[in-house]
Amino acid sequence: MALPGRTSSPHTQRAYFRWVDTYLVDIAELKPTQGDQRIARMSALPVKLLYESISAAQLRAWLGMLARQGHGKQGIDQARAAIVTLTQLLVEAGWFDDYIAAMVANVRPPKAEDGQRPGRWLSKDEIRQLMQSARQISTSRNQELRNHVVMTMLCTMALRRDELASAKWGDLSTQNDRPVMRVHGKGRRMAVIDIPRPVLQALDNWRRVVSPGEPRPPAHSALVRRLWKGGRVSKFGLTPDGIWLIIDLASESAGLGHVAPHDLRRSVAGALQESGVTIDKISRLLRHRNVAITERYLSRLPMRNEGGILMSDLLGLEDEDDDMLWDEDL
């Protein structure tokens, strides 16, 4: 309950929960949790165990372990911030002494590779395959319609999963004869963006099962919902973890391996860049504060090694034995 006063972003709060849980698993040897179990753990953290587990030496050793595991600078900085914030909240609650928080805050993160993990960059065919798979894994018509809305909005509008999970029916409107959606983004930033025609069609089909016989659901109700067994639509909204689960199950069914929700946003940006769309248009779609952020974002995508290919052609190099390429034993 105290954390939102320190960080307003739901994305950051969820990340802090994940890092605190990871810390307790690695240092205190607790079992890992996910979803509602993790929220329950964060709502009733064992203070005695935290007192035994949190120290400057343990935090320094843990951050070093994360660096050896290959975590990037941004992830390690966030992990450190999660434990520092937790310690400060415990001090404010009167459970920890000030000097413990001061010592923990003085721990500097180890050197690590700059930036985020590269993640996945899906091709247009893989995106289509993933969208189709999300419908195929459904066990009811309502689930198929819901999954189609989720995947279509993520794969065309480049929404973050938090943005989609927090969307309400009242966020949809018509402005200047254009259907638009109000998006509540990171850092309490709000943007109004156009809704593509395929998304409108998917939303209209979904609306008919959410509020049958009514023009539209209540403005304050969640845009995408949980489903009960049998496909009955719940009044509760789909959580960010629920969106992750849809993508995870669909990617596994499609044989694409691990695909994270943010990989879809990254893939939309990459596909537009390859198609020749200007960076300012991509930046507006991603709702970055400036084009420089978009340039850094796109720079993390795999670069085409045109120089290496041209040099191979100039040298006249040819594959001597095709059977040696991508040997499964390697």
Image: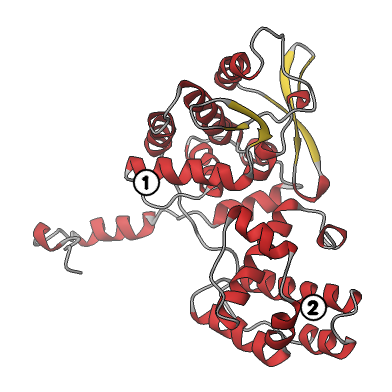
Q: Is residue 122 visible?
A: no
Q: Could you say which is closer to the camera, residue 3 or residue 236? A: 236
Residue at x-position 37% and y-position 58%: 307
Q: Residue at x 52, y 33 (%)?
A: 151
Tell me: residue 315, above or below residue 154.
below
On-image quarter of the N terminus: bottom right
Circle 2 is placed at which residue position?
Answer: 87
**Percent x, y of residue 146:** 54, 27
Circle 1 sits on which residue? 252
Left or right: residue 68 versus residue 82 is left
Image quarter in which the C terminus is found: bottom left
Q: Relative to the observer, which residue lies in front, 90 or 230? A: 230
Residue in the picture at 79% in, 23% down = 219
Give the CA separation, mark 2 to mark 1: 38 Å
Give the number of marks. 2
Label 2 crowd bin: few (<14), some (14–19), many (20+), radius 10 Å: many
Q: Amino acid at mark 2?
A: Thr
Q: In the rendering, at what x and y percent does residue 29 appear?
A: 55, 80
* Relative image position of residue 196 (x, y in whole percent): 61, 22
Taking the image as drawn, is residue 171 in sight? Answer: yes
Q: Front-most of 198 and 82?
A: 82
> Which residue does the image show at 34% across and 40% down from the upper left?
254
* Badge 2 element: helix
Asked if 32 appears above or below 285 in the picture, the reply is below
Left or right: 198 in relation to 86: left
Label 2 with label 1: CB-CB less than 8 Å? no
Colouring chosen for the image of the structure: secondary structure
The three-letter code of the residue at mark 1 reads: Glu
